[in-house]
Structure formats: C-alpha cells, structure tokens
Amino acid sequence: MAVPVVCPGDILCAASEAIAGSGAHVEGEAIRASLVGSVRRVPADAAAPDQRPTIEVIRRGLQQGTPKPGDIITAKVVRINPRLAAVDVLCVGDIPLDTTFTGTIRRQDVRATEVDSVAIADSFRPGDLVRAEVLSLGDSRSYFLGTARNELGVVYARHSTSGQAMVAHSWQEMRCPETQAVEKRKVAKIAS
C-alpha cells in the first residue's frame, strides 16, 4: 500500500488529537504539514504526562517527476521584484520532487482581474509557500506559473517581524495570530 504524501499546508489531524513534531505545525485547531513528505505517528512515551501521539512529516520517498502545463504545483518563493516572483518547485500535485525546478510567477499571471493593479510585493514574499498552475515551459528549466484561480496562491506564510505562521484573513490578507498584524498576500482558498 502506498504511503500518502502530504504537501505544506495540508491538514494532518486536529490539534487536540496529537502533538506537532518535526515537519508539522499547529495552525488554529489543526496540525498542518510544513514539509513535503510522508506522515508518521509516534506513540507517546509511557512516562510522558501528555499521552497524545506525535505527528511528524518525514522527507523521503521523493519522486522523479517533471511539471507539465496544467499541473498544480507547490513552490517556495525565493525572491521577488516588481515584475515577478521567482520560486523553487517542491512538488507536482501530491508528488514531491527530488530535482529542483525553478519557476516564475509574472505580474500578469497573479490574478485573473485587475491585472494592471497587481503588486508582486503585496501578493508574495520570500519564504511563502504557494500553490500555482504550470502555464508553460519558460527558458532554461524555468516554468511560467499562474495563481489566477481562487484555489491558487499563498498557502503558508510567516509574519515578517514576529516569524509566526499566519492565517488567512481574506483573499488578499493574512493575519499573525500573535500580533494581530495584517500583511497583504494573494491567498489561496483552501477547501476544508
């Protein structure tokens, strides 16, 4: 039986059911994956006061794969400029990759409407995890990606000053649960 693969932002279980271990984090009332990999439950030590198991995400079983137009990918933003966001592709669909592919989200491919008013700095920041669609093969192993659909965009981001994982506040804002500060992002609408 194949071990299911999770991507960053995927819900692993309710926070009341387990303790978040390496490769996982608590967001709201859920434990979510922080890495691409397989899930492992570690039973609690008999002497531990908290008898909940620890849930971890292990990076192994990476697959050889190549993104193709139409695929939904998960990527990490590595740098931005006013015209584009450069990303490293982590997985294609639910398949983690063993080879790094680079991608570009151009300003005109961020949203389907009001394309002229898009600001990359208000949509993405370095370190964000993004779900995007492969639009086409660009140049030199780089792919052109788009986030123009509602379910595409930032799935995981950390606050720029506190470093806390932020939660979606609206389709264009994420909020830090610790400081209540709001930062702009092109937020993905994740199905619950």
Image: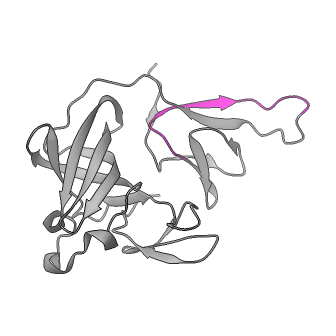
Residue nearer the viewer, 142 or 25 = 142
Where residue 165 appears, x then y in whole percent? 55, 60
Locate residue 161 relative to residue 89 in the image: left or right: right
Magenta range: 33-47
Q: Magenta includes 44?
A: yes
Where residue 176 appears, x then y in whole percent? 56, 70
Q: Magenta includes 116?
A: no
Q: Quadrant of residue 36?
A: top left
Where residue 37 appears, x then y in whole percent? 47, 32
Q: Quadrant of residue 102?
A: top left
Colour style of the rendered protein structure: one colour
Locate residue 48 relative to residue 65 in the image: left or right: right
Residue nearer the viewer, 133 or 142 = 142
Q: Quadrant of residue 122?
A: bottom left
Locate residue 165 relative to residue 4 in the image: left or right: right
Locate residue 157 relative to residue 110 in the image: left or right: right
Q: How many marks?
A: 0
Where residue 88 appears, x then y in whole percent? 30, 44
Residue nearer the viewer, 190 or 102 = 102
Q: Is residue 10 above or below residue 159?
A: above
Residue found at x 73% / y 36%:
53
Residue found at x 44% / y 22%:
2
Residue found at x 60% / y 49%:
25
